[in-house]
Amino acid sequence: MQKVPEAGYAIEGLWISGLQRKLTLDNLSFPFKVIDSLNKSAKIIKKFKPHAVVGVGGYASGPLLRVATGKKVPAVIQEQNSYAGLTNKLLAKKVQKICVAYPNMERFFPQEKVILTGNPVRKDITELAGKRSLGLAHFGLAEDKPVLMILGGSLGARTLNDSVIENLTQLIEAEVQVIWQCGRFYFEEMTEKLAKTEHNGLVHLYEFLKEMDLAYASADVVISRAGALSVSELSIAGKPTIFVPSPNVAEDHQSKNAKAMVDNDAAVLVKDNEARDQLINRAIELIRDEAQKDRLSKNIKAMAKPNAAEEIVEEIVKLIA
């Protein structure tokens, strides 16, 4: 809702949400939301007259693509995760192409429509070579100490933040420098807690990281949630990574994303309910294990799809050419 308008594109909202898997008041309004969203989608399609439509699996993709495909508008869906979401599975028969980020997605979609493209990521992350010294200087980090980067997303992740706060002493004793993006919801709280602990300037706390290319270039090891775009970015960055999947997402897709990497020896997995006890110890162990870092970096890089945006656009252009 912020980035899209900043890029110069208007947003049209639909009154739609997910269907809860238990009886709730929200579910009672769901049929009305669907009808309202279908009607508004029809008006949007009529006004905008698109040559093609693209859905990325959100709730709004359902009614909009349902209307568009009913009017014979060419359609593409992009499935970002290793486990297909309900919206995309429902739309699969209606669209012409399905761009996916993981192999073996034919178990969810018609095989003849599936194209392995990867997920689009920001361009600056594809060009990290030679940026480490620049990154260390930008974040005020020393060249002779390892760097741990912690990513909780723009809103933050309670488990990751608490794991750091509760184990700060271990990081300081190990002389590990930390780039810690704690998220908007937790920044004030974590700032207060960090101020109560002597950390010798090793811990650098941020609400949000804008210079992600410099942060990735500086990091020796990364701790992250396992959202689809985070996994894609870390693959392209080629960073040894510990994934802590969020348990609070639909169909537990973050665990499935992380497992896809772990099964290829491309990342380490720490479960959310074990993170407070194990995460920082595991991170320190990995920082000290040069052989494992090299192996993870090589393997996660091999799973990267750096040209995803171009390949998806090519498929869209083929449909409208």
Image (spheres, rainbow, N blue to C red):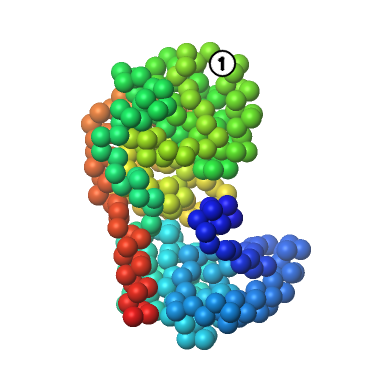
Q: Is residue 58 above or below residue 124?
A: below
Q: Is residue 104 visible?
A: no
Q: Is residue 64 visible?
A: yes
State the residue at coordinates (56%, 30%).
Answer: 162
Q: Residue 184: horizontal and vertical position, in percent?
A: 60, 38
State the residue at coordinates (31%, 24%).
Answer: 288
Mark 1 neighbour class, 10 Å CA radius: few under 14, some 14 to 19, many 20 or more: few
Could you say which is closer to the camera, residue 155 or residue 321? 321
Q: Residue 93: horizontal and vertical position, in percent?
A: 45, 80
Could you say which is closer to the camera, residue 308 or residue 22? 308
Could you say which is closer to the camera, residue 56 or residue 20? 56
Q: Residue 231: horizontal and vertical position, in percent?
A: 39, 48
State the residue at coordinates (73%, 63%).
Answer: 26
Q: Is residue 83 above or below residue 320?
A: above
Numbered disc 1: secondary structure: loop
Q: Quadrant of the C terminus?
A: bottom left
State the residue at coordinates (60%, 28%).
Answer: 190
Badge 1 amino acid: Thr
Numbered marks: total: 1
**Residue underneath mark 1:** 197
Q: Residue 222: horizontal and vertical position, in percent?
A: 39, 35
The residue furthest front is: 8
Q: Is residue 86 above or below residue 170?
A: below
Residue 92 as seen in the image, left or right of residue 27 = left
Residue 75 as seen in the image, left or right of residue 246 = left
